[in-house]
Amino acid sequence: MPEGNEIHRWAERHAAAFAGRPVKVDGPQGRFTDAAVIDGRKLVRVMAVGKHLGYDFGKDRILHVHLGLQGDFTEGSGPLLEVRGALRLRMWNAAAVKRPAEPGVSKRHGWYSEDDGTGHVAPKKVAWVELRGPMDCSVYTQAMWEKLLKRLGPDPLNGDGPEKMIAKVRKSKKAIGALLMDQTVAAGVGNIYRAELLYRARLNPFTPGNEVEEKRLRSIWKDAGGLMKAGMVDRRIVTTRASDRPHRRGKVLKEEAHYVYRRQGRECFVCGTKILTKVMAGRNLFWCPTCQAGKKQEE
Protein backbone atom coordinates (compact mmCIF):
# COMPACT_ATOMS: atom_id res chain seq x y z
CA MET A 1 0.00 0.00 0.00
CA PRO A 2 1.39 3.45 -0.89
CA GLU A 3 2.42 5.44 2.17
CA GLY A 4 2.01 9.14 2.81
CA ASN A 5 5.06 10.20 0.81
CA GLU A 6 3.61 8.77 -2.40
CA ILE A 7 0.11 10.15 -1.82
CA HIS A 8 1.48 13.65 -1.27
CA ARG A 9 3.64 13.26 -4.36
CA TRP A 10 0.58 12.41 -6.45
CA ALA A 11 -1.24 15.43 -5.01
CA GLU A 12 1.59 17.76 -6.02
CA ARG A 13 1.84 16.30 -9.53
CA HIS A 14 -1.89 16.34 -10.21
CA ALA A 15 -2.28 19.86 -8.85
CA ALA A 16 0.50 21.06 -11.16
CA ALA A 17 -1.12 19.33 -14.13
CA PHE A 18 -4.80 20.15 -13.62
CA ALA A 19 -5.59 22.61 -10.83
CA GLY A 20 -7.03 25.99 -11.77
CA ARG A 21 -8.72 24.87 -14.99
CA PRO A 22 -11.67 22.75 -16.16
CA VAL A 23 -10.94 19.03 -16.20
CA LYS A 24 -12.56 16.24 -18.15
CA VAL A 25 -13.43 13.10 -16.19
CA ASP A 26 -14.98 9.76 -17.11
CA GLY A 27 -15.25 6.19 -15.80
CA PRO A 28 -14.71 3.77 -18.70
CA GLN A 29 -15.08 0.68 -16.52
CA GLY A 30 -18.58 1.68 -15.44
CA ARG A 31 -17.92 1.38 -11.70
CA PHE A 32 -17.26 5.10 -11.22
CA THR A 33 -20.77 6.48 -11.61
CA ASP A 34 -20.17 10.04 -10.39
CA ALA A 35 -18.26 11.29 -13.42
CA ALA A 36 -21.07 13.57 -14.58
CA VAL A 37 -20.98 15.41 -11.24
CA ILE A 38 -17.44 16.70 -11.77
CA ASP A 39 -16.81 16.36 -15.53
CA GLY A 40 -15.91 19.71 -17.06
CA ARG A 41 -15.71 21.53 -13.74
CA LYS A 42 -12.67 23.50 -12.59
CA LEU A 43 -10.38 21.61 -10.26
CA VAL A 44 -9.71 24.02 -7.41
CA ARG A 45 -6.97 22.06 -5.61
CA VAL A 46 -5.73 18.59 -4.78
CA MET A 47 -5.51 17.65 -1.12
CA ALA A 48 -3.54 14.85 0.50
CA VAL A 49 -4.16 13.65 4.04
CA GLY A 50 -2.50 10.48 5.19
CA LYS A 51 -3.31 7.88 2.54
CA HIS A 52 -6.27 9.80 1.11
CA LEU A 53 -6.48 12.09 -1.92
CA GLY A 54 -9.17 14.73 -2.33
CA TYR A 55 -9.74 16.52 -5.65
CA ASP A 56 -11.73 19.65 -4.86
CA PHE A 57 -14.18 20.53 -7.65
CA GLY A 58 -16.21 22.90 -5.48
CA LYS A 59 -18.83 22.57 -2.76
CA ASP A 60 -19.92 18.98 -2.18
CA ARG A 61 -17.87 17.82 -5.16
CA ILE A 62 -14.69 16.31 -3.73
CA LEU A 63 -13.37 13.30 -5.59
CA HIS A 64 -12.03 10.95 -2.92
CA VAL A 65 -9.38 8.39 -3.88
CA HIS A 66 -7.90 5.78 -1.59
CA LEU A 67 -5.48 3.55 -3.48
CA GLY A 68 -5.52 0.70 -0.98
CA LEU A 69 -3.26 -2.27 -1.72
CA GLN A 70 -3.86 -2.50 -5.48
CA GLY A 71 -4.58 1.04 -6.68
CA ASP A 72 -2.18 2.88 -8.96
CA PHE A 73 -2.08 5.74 -11.42
CA THR A 74 -0.76 5.83 -14.96
CA GLU A 75 0.03 9.26 -16.35
CA GLY A 76 1.16 10.61 -19.67
CA SER A 77 1.20 13.40 -22.22
CA GLY A 78 -0.39 13.73 -25.64
CA PRO A 79 -3.62 12.02 -26.81
CA LEU A 80 -5.57 9.65 -24.58
CA LEU A 81 -4.63 6.00 -24.95
CA GLU A 82 -7.03 3.26 -25.96
CA VAL A 83 -8.98 2.01 -22.95
CA ARG A 84 -7.43 -1.17 -21.59
CA GLY A 85 -8.11 -3.32 -18.57
CA ALA A 86 -10.15 -2.37 -15.53
CA LEU A 87 -9.79 1.38 -15.94
CA ARG A 88 -11.78 2.96 -13.10
CA LEU A 89 -11.27 6.64 -13.87
CA ARG A 90 -9.63 8.96 -16.38
CA MET A 91 -8.90 12.64 -15.87
CA TRP A 92 -7.52 14.86 -18.62
CA ASN A 93 -6.88 18.36 -19.87
CA ALA A 94 -8.90 18.82 -23.07
CA ALA A 95 -6.33 21.12 -24.65
CA ALA A 96 -3.26 19.15 -23.59
CA VAL A 97 -4.46 15.85 -25.09
CA LYS A 98 -4.46 17.53 -28.52
CA ARG A 99 -0.72 18.16 -28.33
CA PRO A 100 1.97 15.68 -29.37
CA ALA A 101 3.12 13.29 -26.67
CA GLU A 102 6.34 13.87 -24.80
CA PRO A 103 9.04 11.18 -25.04
CA GLY A 104 7.99 8.11 -23.09
CA VAL A 105 4.25 8.75 -23.70
CA SER A 106 3.10 7.24 -20.42
CA LYS A 107 4.47 5.94 -17.14
CA ARG A 108 2.88 3.54 -14.70
CA HIS A 109 4.58 3.48 -11.34
CA GLY A 110 6.09 0.13 -10.49
CA TRP A 111 6.95 -1.22 -7.06
CA TYR A 112 8.43 1.72 -5.17
CA SER A 113 11.91 0.20 -4.79
CA GLU A 114 12.12 -0.39 -8.55
CA ASP A 115 11.12 3.17 -9.45
CA ASP A 116 13.69 5.92 -8.90
CA GLY A 117 11.51 8.66 -10.35
CA THR A 118 13.32 8.85 -13.68
CA GLY A 119 11.44 8.74 -16.95
CA HIS A 120 8.30 10.38 -15.60
CA VAL A 121 6.57 13.15 -17.51
CA ALA A 122 7.20 16.58 -15.96
CA PRO A 123 4.15 17.43 -13.79
CA LYS A 124 3.09 20.47 -15.82
CA LYS A 125 3.27 18.44 -19.03
CA VAL A 126 0.98 15.66 -17.79
CA ALA A 127 -2.10 15.70 -20.04
CA TRP A 128 -3.99 12.77 -18.53
CA VAL A 129 -4.01 10.27 -15.68
CA GLU A 130 -5.64 6.85 -15.41
CA LEU A 131 -6.64 5.15 -12.18
CA ARG A 132 -6.93 1.40 -11.71
CA GLY A 133 -7.69 -0.79 -8.72
CA PRO A 134 -8.39 1.76 -5.94
CA MET A 135 -10.06 0.85 -2.67
CA ASP A 136 -12.32 3.86 -3.12
CA CYS A 137 -13.04 6.31 -5.91
CA SER A 138 -16.19 8.33 -5.24
CA VAL A 139 -17.45 11.88 -4.88
CA TYR A 140 -17.68 13.14 -1.31
CA THR A 141 -19.76 15.95 0.08
CA GLN A 142 -17.95 18.53 2.20
CA ALA A 143 -19.46 16.92 5.29
CA MET A 144 -18.09 13.51 4.32
CA TRP A 145 -14.62 14.95 3.74
CA GLU A 146 -14.64 16.76 7.07
CA LYS A 147 -15.77 13.58 8.83
CA LEU A 148 -12.80 11.78 7.29
CA LEU A 149 -10.40 14.49 8.47
CA LYS A 150 -11.75 14.28 12.02
CA ARG A 151 -11.19 10.54 12.05
CA LEU A 152 -7.59 10.71 10.84
CA GLY A 153 -4.63 11.46 13.04
CA PRO A 154 -2.11 14.24 12.33
CA ASP A 155 -0.10 14.04 9.09
CA PRO A 156 3.67 14.75 9.26
CA LEU A 157 3.65 16.02 5.66
CA ASN A 158 0.92 18.58 6.31
CA GLY A 159 2.93 20.34 8.98
CA ASP A 160 0.79 18.93 11.79
CA GLY A 161 2.27 18.87 15.24
CA PRO A 162 2.67 15.63 17.20
CA GLU A 163 0.44 16.54 20.14
CA LYS A 164 -2.59 14.42 19.14
CA MET A 165 -0.35 11.49 18.29
CA ILE A 166 1.46 11.74 21.60
CA ALA A 167 -1.79 11.95 23.56
CA LYS A 168 -3.20 8.80 21.94
CA VAL A 169 0.00 6.80 22.28
CA ARG A 170 0.59 7.78 25.90
CA LYS A 171 -2.95 6.65 26.86
CA SER A 172 -2.69 3.25 25.19
CA LYS A 173 -1.33 -0.08 26.37
CA LYS A 174 -1.06 -1.32 22.79
CA ALA A 175 2.40 -1.94 21.37
CA ILE A 176 3.97 1.11 19.75
CA GLY A 177 4.48 -0.98 16.60
CA ALA A 178 0.72 -1.44 16.30
CA LEU A 179 -0.11 2.15 17.21
CA LEU A 180 2.06 3.58 14.42
CA MET A 181 0.01 1.59 11.89
CA ASP A 182 -3.23 3.14 13.16
CA GLN A 183 -4.21 5.99 10.82
CA THR A 184 -6.13 7.68 13.63
CA VAL A 185 -2.79 7.99 15.45
CA ALA A 186 -0.45 9.02 12.62
CA ALA A 187 -1.92 9.53 9.15
CA GLY A 188 0.28 8.39 6.29
CA VAL A 189 2.72 6.24 8.28
CA GLY A 190 2.65 2.73 6.85
CA ASN A 191 4.51 -0.52 7.22
CA ILE A 192 7.86 0.64 5.86
CA TYR A 193 8.03 3.82 7.91
CA ARG A 194 6.69 2.00 10.99
CA ALA A 195 9.60 -0.44 10.98
CA GLU A 196 12.28 2.05 10.00
CA LEU A 197 11.24 4.84 12.38
CA LEU A 198 11.26 2.45 15.33
CA TYR A 199 14.68 1.16 14.37
CA ARG A 200 16.13 4.65 13.98
CA ALA A 201 14.68 5.51 17.41
CA ARG A 202 16.18 2.27 18.83
CA LEU A 203 12.73 1.53 20.22
CA ASN A 204 11.45 -1.99 20.76
CA PRO A 205 8.22 -2.34 18.71
CA PHE A 206 6.54 -4.36 21.48
CA THR A 207 6.84 -1.54 24.02
CA PRO A 208 3.38 -0.39 25.22
CA GLY A 209 2.54 3.12 24.08
CA ASN A 210 2.09 4.40 27.61
CA GLU A 211 5.71 3.45 28.38
CA VAL A 212 7.21 5.48 25.54
CA GLU A 213 8.61 8.81 26.69
CA GLU A 214 7.12 11.98 25.20
CA LYS A 215 10.59 13.17 24.18
CA ARG A 216 11.15 10.03 22.15
CA LEU A 217 7.74 10.33 20.47
CA ARG A 218 8.52 13.91 19.47
CA SER A 219 11.82 12.75 18.02
CA ILE A 220 10.07 9.99 16.02
CA TRP A 221 7.55 12.51 14.66
CA LYS A 222 10.30 14.89 13.55
CA ASP A 223 12.16 12.02 11.93
CA ALA A 224 8.98 10.90 10.13
CA GLY A 225 8.50 14.34 8.59
CA GLY A 226 12.04 14.43 7.23
CA LEU A 227 12.08 10.89 5.87
CA MET A 228 8.64 11.15 4.27
CA LYS A 229 9.46 14.49 2.66
CA ALA A 230 12.60 12.97 1.17
CA GLY A 231 10.51 10.05 -0.06
CA MET A 232 8.34 12.41 -2.10
CA VAL A 233 11.23 13.34 -4.37
CA ASP A 234 11.69 10.07 -6.26
CA ARG A 235 9.38 7.56 -4.52
CA ARG A 236 12.31 5.62 -3.07
CA ILE A 237 12.11 5.31 0.68
CA VAL A 238 15.69 5.53 1.93
CA THR A 239 16.05 5.40 5.70
CA THR A 240 19.65 4.30 6.23
CA ARG A 241 22.40 6.75 7.09
CA ALA A 242 25.46 6.73 4.85
CA SER A 243 27.73 5.89 7.78
CA ASP A 244 25.79 2.64 8.41
CA ARG A 245 25.73 1.33 4.83
CA PRO A 246 28.25 -1.24 3.56
CA HIS A 247 28.85 1.13 0.63
CA ARG A 248 29.08 4.60 2.12
CA ARG A 249 29.52 6.51 -1.13
CA GLY A 250 27.64 6.74 -4.39
CA LYS A 251 24.04 5.86 -5.12
CA VAL A 252 22.20 4.00 -2.38
CA LEU A 253 21.84 0.37 -3.42
CA LYS A 254 18.40 -1.22 -3.20
CA GLU A 255 19.56 -3.70 -0.57
CA GLU A 256 20.99 -0.88 1.58
CA ALA A 257 17.97 1.45 1.56
CA HIS A 258 16.41 0.07 4.77
CA TYR A 259 17.68 -1.01 8.15
CA VAL A 260 15.11 -3.73 8.88
CA TYR A 261 12.17 -3.63 6.45
CA ARG A 262 12.08 -6.89 4.47
CA ARG A 263 15.56 -7.78 5.74
CA GLN A 264 14.48 -10.72 7.91
CA GLY A 265 17.23 -13.28 8.39
CA ARG A 266 19.92 -10.88 7.25
CA GLU A 267 22.47 -9.15 9.46
CA CYS A 268 21.79 -5.74 10.96
CA PHE A 269 24.07 -3.14 9.36
CA VAL A 270 24.96 -1.76 12.77
CA CYS A 271 25.34 -4.73 15.13
CA GLY A 272 25.35 -7.83 12.92
CA THR A 273 22.37 -9.49 14.64
CA LYS A 274 19.86 -11.22 12.36
CA ILE A 275 16.70 -9.20 11.69
CA LEU A 276 13.48 -10.77 12.96
CA THR A 277 9.91 -10.61 11.67
CA LYS A 278 6.43 -11.20 13.05
CA VAL A 279 2.92 -10.17 12.04
CA MET A 280 1.67 -7.15 13.97
CA ALA A 281 -1.43 -5.09 13.17
CA GLY A 282 -2.06 -7.25 10.12
CA ARG A 283 1.30 -6.60 8.46
CA ASN A 284 4.78 -8.07 8.77
CA LEU A 285 6.86 -6.23 11.35
CA PHE A 286 10.67 -6.22 11.13
CA TRP A 287 13.11 -5.35 13.91
CA CYS A 288 16.60 -5.93 15.30
CA PRO A 289 16.47 -7.64 18.70
CA THR A 290 19.80 -6.11 19.71
CA CYS A 291 19.56 -2.52 18.51
CA GLN A 292 15.92 -2.41 19.59
CA ALA A 293 16.25 -4.36 22.80
CA GLY A 294 13.99 -3.31 25.66
CA LYS A 295 11.88 -4.52 28.53
CA LYS A 296 9.22 -5.81 26.14
CA GLN A 297 10.43 -8.52 23.79
CA GLU A 298 8.55 -10.70 21.35
CA GLU A 299 6.89 -13.59 23.15
Image (cartoon, rainbow, N blue to C red):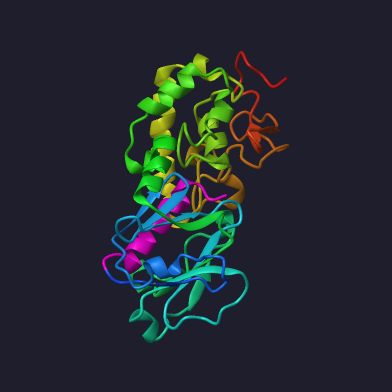
Q: Is residue 168 magenta?
A: no
Place of residue 290 in the rendered image (x, y in percent of width and height, measured from the top left): 63, 23
Q: Position of residue 37 (x, y in %)?
A: 39, 66
Residue 241: x and y, percent?
A: 48, 39
Across and down, in percent, residue 248 comes to 51, 44
User: Which residue lies at the image location 36% right of the left edge and 46% below the top edge?
Assistant: 143
In the figure, is residue 108 to the left or right of 140?
right
The C terminus lies in quadrant:
top right
Q: Residue at the spot x=36%, y=58% of the render? A: 61
36 over 298 or under it: above or below: below
Q: Is residue 164 above or below residue 98?
A: above
Magenta portion: prevailing SS class: helix
Picture quadrant where residue 39 is located: bottom left
Between residue 164 and residue 194, name the one nearer to us.
164
Q: Residue at point 38% right, 63% down?
A: 14
**Residue 21 quadrant:** bottom left
Q: Which span of residues is magenta-colored? A: 1-20
Please give the count of numbered marks on the rendered protein.
0
Camera-side residue: 207 or 29?
29
Can you tell which quarter of the image residue 85 is in?
Answer: bottom right
Judge left or right: residue 4 versus residue 125: right
Residue 58 position (above or below residue 224):
below
